[in-house]
Image: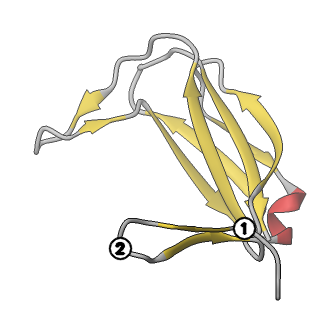
Amino acid sequence: MGAGLECYDANGALLFDTTYAPGRCVGSVDTNGSSGSINVPEFSMGKPFVVLSVTSSPIPHRDANGNLHAPVKVSISGNTLSWKYAGDMGGNTTIVYGYSP
């Protein structure tokens, strides 16, 4: 009999087990309210991800449909992590980045 951990949702679908490979955080960058980019060699080791943490008070904006958007847009191309602020939103955002195998 095998041993391990398995987690299921209310419908019985498997959400997590011991074969799941969680992501690895490899760094963070403070935007200081300015657009920019950095090279992250570890992105080539798996599927890149980012988590945003707004650390000061930029004002989100609404699109033509009334949807609320973060003031900074983040993109990943190859090993390059880029971010761009919408207009003069300012404020600081910390971008935590990593990859999942």
Which one is in front, 47 or 59? 47
Question: What amino acid is at disc 2?
Answer: Asn
Q: Residue at coordinates 41% horizontally, 20% vertically from top-left?
A: 89
Q: Residue at coordinates 82% horizontally, 88% vertically from top-left?
A: 1
Write down the residue under mark 1.
Answer: 5
Quarter of the image holding residue 22? bottom right
Question: What amino acid is at disc 1?
Answer: Leu
Secondary-structure class at tag 2: loop
Tell me if residue 58 comes above or below residue 27 in the rendering.
above
Tell me if residue 9 comes above or below residue 86 in the rendering.
below
Write down the residue under mark 2.
Answer: 11
Kindly give the residue lying farthest to the bottom in the view shown.
1
Kindly give the residue lying farthest to the front in the view shown.
1
Which one is in front, 40 or 13? 13
Q: Residue at coordinates 53% horizontally, 38% vertically from top-left?
A: 84
Q: Residues within 10 Å of mark 1 (few under 14, many from 20)?
A: few
Q: Residue at coordinates 82% horizontally, 76% vertically from top-left?
A: 3
The x, y position of residue 25, in whole percent, is: 80, 47
The x, y position of residue 99, in whole percent, is: 76, 60
